[in-house]
Image: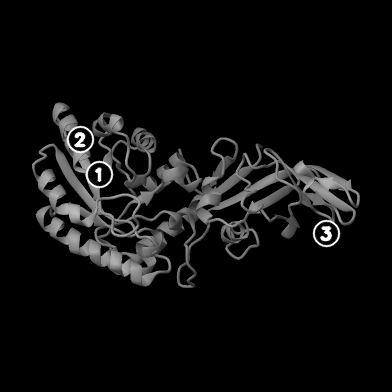
Amino acid sequence: MTFPKAVINLRYLTHNLRQIKKAISQQTKIMAVVKANAYGHGLLPITRHLHHQGINYFGVARLEEALAIRRLIKDATILVLSPIPEENFPDAVKERISLTVSDQLALKQLNNIARRAKTKALVHLKIDTGLHRSGLAPDEVTGFIKVITNQKNVILEGVFTHFANADSDNRFTQKQLGLFREIALPIKRLFPHTLLHTAASSAIFRFKESHFDLVRPGLALYGHISFTSPKINLKPILALTTRISRIHRVQKNETIGYDRTYTTKRKLTVATLMMGYADGLRRAPLSWPQVLIRNKSAPIVGRISMDQSVVDVSRIKPTPSAKSTVLLLDDRSDSLCSLEAIAKKIGTSPYEVLVDLSENRVHRIYIHGKVN
């Protein structure tokens, strides 16, 4: 068995999808956000399982992701949520990939490409309501709508925005929501089949008025949410493990790891793990704090290397052996090695911890579901 490995529980993925469905109306569509290798969980296996559960709408960030899904599911509706280079427009139009647009030039280019191909380009208009990262400014929307009305080979499939802080800042989220409603509802009257959407994971559970025609769950699908609520019953779907390759003793006043940053204060029993920062074991801004061996905590000591790391197992009895399994991310929310606990300790977000897991070096195993 290759290590490190991520064990991904598809039964829990189905459970989380059901929790999301409970939070929305039956008329509201679900677009599963599977960008960044499905947040580190594996793009195609996760997409395939969700499709088996009735999901046919997927959100990604890159055209390459969209094309991979198109090869897998011929009839899927796929939206690229981020801008793409104009040289990729022909491939997107050919493969019926919906694109996010926020400027008139891109709109006209897509129309011309679609006209020459004797087809239609599918677009979603993104409106910048306060995140100030991408999207059309509110005062530019009227001009944009005038232009799109004359683009006969473009279908306005959706209008959307993205919240800056829906997990905690109620006032600003309501401000964004009010601005979106003011702009988008008149567009909906002009284009009745256009889908309005604003809600990602946090807003799905905190702002029912933000659901509109479609919601975009991302992190929630994988069992996590950016705020604490006992009413939300999500189950983390991923557990990350590796193995011990060596057990040895280090004397007092010896150093461990590169740059000799850690000096032993007493005689230690240490274990070398088959996982390093190339696999996704973060060492900056703060180092990964600990692992679990037989449900007991073992702190990482010394600098994490590219392929290996070292933990102090002196307090674990009986002493672990080489080839013992080590848990780095637990699928239990109350664990010392839960995703949230680890992310907090190393000074980053759960998103970063997940997407840092190497696509090629961390072996992903899927249980309780079919991915073929």
Where residue 285 appears, x then y in whole percent?
Answer: 61, 52
Q: Is residue 59 left or right of residue 348?
A: left
The kind of residue on which mark 1 rests is Val
Q: Residues within 10 Å of mark 2 (few under 14, many from 20)?
A: many
Q: Secondary structure at mark 1?
A: strand
Q: Residue at x 57, y 63 (%)?
A: 333
- How many numbered circles are shown? 3
> Which residue is disc 2 drawn over?
110
Q: Tell me if residue 259 comes above or below residue 312 in the rendering.
A: above
The kind of residue on which mark 3 rests is Arg
N-terminal-most mark, 2 or 3: 2
Q: Is residue 269 left or right of residue 151?
A: right
Label 2 – label 3 distance at C-alpha: 63 Å
Q: Is residue 213 left or right of residue 33?
A: left
Labelled pair 3, 1 in contact (Cβ < 8 Å): no
Q: Secondary structure at mark 3?
A: loop
> Which residue is disc 3 drawn over?
315
Q: Residues within 10 Å of mark 1 (few under 14, many from 20)?
A: many
N-terminal-most mark, 1 or 2: 1
Q: Quadrant of the C terminus?
A: top left
Labelled pair 1, 2 in contact (Cβ < 8 Å): yes
The numbered mark at residue 101 is: 1
Q: Residue at x 44, y 39 (%)?
A: 44
Label 3 – label 1 distance at C-alpha: 57 Å
Mark 3 or mark 1: which is in front?
A: 1
Mark 2 or mark 3: which is in front?
A: 2
The kind of residue on which mark 2 rests is Leu
Where residue 47 appears, x then y in whole percent?
Answer: 41, 44
